[in-house]
Image (cartoon, grey):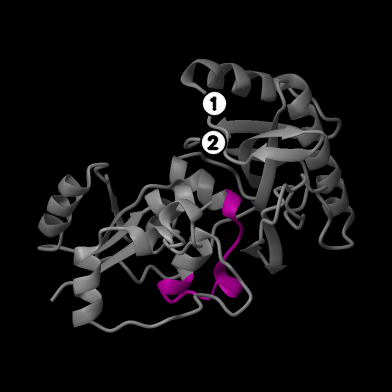
Amino acid sequence: MKTLLVLLDGLGDRPVEKLGGKTPLGAARRKNLDWMCEHGKTGIMYPIGKGIAPESDEAALALLGYDPFRYHTGRGPLEAMGWGVKFRPGEIVLRCNFTKARKGWITDFQFKPSEKDVKKYVRELNKIKIEGATLRFIKTLGYRAVLILKDSLSDRVSNTHPGYKIARNYVSSAQPRKGPLKIKKCRPLTKDKKAKRTAEIVNEFVRKSNEVLGDNLVVITRGAGSGMPKIKKNYRGWAMMADTPVEKAVGKITGMTVAGKPENLEKLAGKVKTSLKKYNVYVQIKGPDTWAH
């Protein structure tokens, strides 16, 4: 017997006035989900722990049996690996968002540049000069990117993205959004001089990103890390079909075969059925999370 694990990423939501006070899931046509609930077992779990609203990569590691407090090494390195971006040991990798902000207050957390503009944006961001630092900026999926820093720095710095706060070690928790949020200052998480200098560099990069991009566009950072998790590849008999770079990276480091995922759900179902003849299958469907954010 094979196992199929489907993650409906970000499915949890709140009541919406336009849906008559129902949540999106409550208002949805969900014949198949209802059938599975009626014929299976249901429950509630905390992937990491009470009080922590985990990011996708942390939750994925936890669901696969790896303690994120022990094995998670930052969102940035996983984003880079999942997109095929190589970095050297000791380089600091931060996950970035293109955002819109006015006077530091964010108006759009997930601004997706057009294909026409993105090459120009990346080119200008890579021209940024910061004394004592060497940087690379690479656009990944949609509004996402990675910033890679080198030259004897530290990954123990806080996020400038106000939506996520470091809880412990490299594990962060999504924060409540009540009204507009302001870009945070990057701060050292240790008393190490390298951490202090890294925070200064990140703050300067964020400030200069707004200067070179203009039009209220700014790059914010989160999930700094300098290496990949060292874990046992316990999932060699699995195939992963995922939408996002970090999820694909989790598949790679746990030993899964990472396969292409059709956007069309009917085609996806067909590919899953075929794959189950050979593999256990892990499927991430990111669509709900795009709206839940």
Q: Residue furthest front?
A: 20
Range of magenta residues: 62-76
Q: x and y percent of residue 189 in the render?
A: 81, 61
What kind of residue is marked 2? Tyr
Q: Is residue 100 magenta?
A: no
Please indicate, yes or no, whether residue 232 appears anywhere in the rendered image.
yes
Where does residue 49 sit, x and y in percent of width and height?
Answer: 58, 79
Residue 147: x and y, percent?
65, 38
Residue 214 or residue 199, whichever sits in front: 214
When asked about the image quadrant of residue 126, the answer is: top right
**Residue annotated with mark 1:** 113
Q: Is residue 22 above or below residue 263?
A: below
Residues at discs 2 and 1 in contact (Cβ within 8 Å):
yes
Q: What residue type is disc 1 on? A: Pro
Instruction: Decide: few, some or many residues near mark 2? Use Cα within 10 Å; few <14, some 14-19, many ≥20.
Output: some
Q: Residue at x 24, y 71 (%)?
A: 34
Query: Mark on residue 87?
Result: none
Q: How many marks?
A: 2
Q: In the figure, residue 173 lies in which quadrant?
A: bottom right
Residue 230 seen in the figure: no
- Callout 2 secondary element: loop
> At 25% from the left edge and 67% from the top edge, which residue is drawn?
33
Q: Is residue 61 left or right of residue 27?
A: right
Under circle 1, the secondary element is: loop
Q: Is residue 130 left or right of residue 168?
A: right
The structure residue drawn at horizontal position 40% and vertical position 72%, both measured from the top left corner, is 64
| Callout 1 crowding tier (Cα within 10 Å): few <14, some 14–19, many ≥20 | some
Q: Say above or below: 278 vs 184.
A: below
* 123 in relation to 182, above or below: above
* Relative side of 18 to 269, left or right: right
Name the residue beneath numbered marker 2.
Answer: 143
Q: Split into 4 quadrants, where in the image is the N terminus?
A: bottom left
